[in-house]
Amino acid sequence: MTRAVGRLLRNVRAGERRSPLAGAGITAPYDISVTSTAFSDGGVMPASSAGKGVGENVSPQLRWTAPPPETRQLVLIIDDVDVPLPRPLLHTIALIEPRMQDVDTGALQPGTAGMRFIPGGLGHRGYAGPRPIPGHGPHHYRFHVLALDEPIPDHISTAKGLLKQMAGHVLARGVLTGTYERP
C-alpha cells in the first residue's frame, strides 16, 4: 500500500525553490566546500545513515573547508527537497562552534561538544536520517553549512526564528547533496 502511494506521488515534490532557505534572503557565495567519506556529492548515502525504521540513523561524517575568519557561528541544515509536501522538510538543524571543521560519524546528536540543536520539521533535536516514501523515487538530501558573522542567541529555538535571525548575517556557505531511495 505505501509503495503504491509513493508511486502515485512520484511527481509531487517540494523543490528547491520552495525551500525555507531560498526564502531566507541568503545571497552569500558558495565559498565553503563540504565533503563526506560516506558519499560523494550527488552520490547515494549509505543505508546506515537512513532514518529510524529504515536504517541505523547514524549521521555521516562531514568535513568543510575553513569559513571566513570573521565567522562567529556555523549552521548545519539538512533538508529533503523531494518530499511530497508544499515545502522541503528540514531534517536536522545544528548550531556549531566556528572552530570546528568536521563532524565524526554519528556525532550529530545532543550532547556532542560544540553543538546545539534546534528542532527541524520532524520535531526532534539531532540527526534525522532519510526515510522517503517507498516507491517515490530518489530523494536529494542537502547538507548546508553556513558561516554567520554573529552567534545565534540561546533563546532562538525554532527553524523559523533561526532563519529570521540569520537574514543578512551569512558570510559564506557550502552544500553537499546525498541521495537516498526506498524501492
Image (cartoon, rainbow, N blue to C red):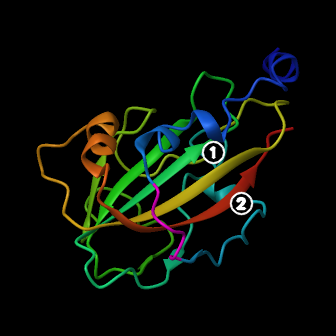
157 relative to 167 in the view: left or right: left
Residue 68 lies in what quarter of the image? bottom left
> In percent of the image, x 34 and y 43: which residue is there?
163
For residue 102, above or below residue 24: below
> Where is residue 178 drawn, in percent x and y?
69, 58
> In percent of the image, x 61 and y 75: which residue is there?
36
**Amino acid type of disc 2?**
Met
**Amino acid type of disc 1?**
Pro
- Which residue is label 2 attached to? 45
Helix, strand or loop: magenta stretch: loop
Residue placed most toward the observer, 29 or 81: 29
Residue placed most toward the observer, 11 or 130: 11
Membership of 8 in magenta stretch: no
The numbered disc on residue 130 is 1
Look at the numbered disc 2 and give the secondary structure of its residue. Answer: loop
Q: Label 2 near label 1: C-beta < 8 Å?
A: yes
Q: Residues within 10 Å of mark 2 (few under 14, many from 20)?
A: many
Membership of 30 in magenta stretch: yes
Residue 133 lies in what quarter of the image? top right
For residue 17, above or below residue 65: above
Look at the numbered disc 1 and give the secondary structure of its residue. Answer: loop
Q: Of callouts 1 and 2, which one flags the residue occurring earlier in the amino acid sequence?
A: 2
> Where is residue 158 drawn, in percent x and y?
28, 36
> Where is residue 94 drawn, in percent x and y?
35, 56
> In percent of the image, x 38 and y 32: which residue is there?
123
Marks 1 and 2, how far apart at CA? 9 Å
Span colored in magenta: 27-32
Quarter occupied by the N terminus: top right
The numbered disc on residue 38 is none
> In percent of the image, x 55 and y 52: which residue is there?
57
Q: Residues within 10 Å of mark 1 (few under 14, many from 20)?
A: many
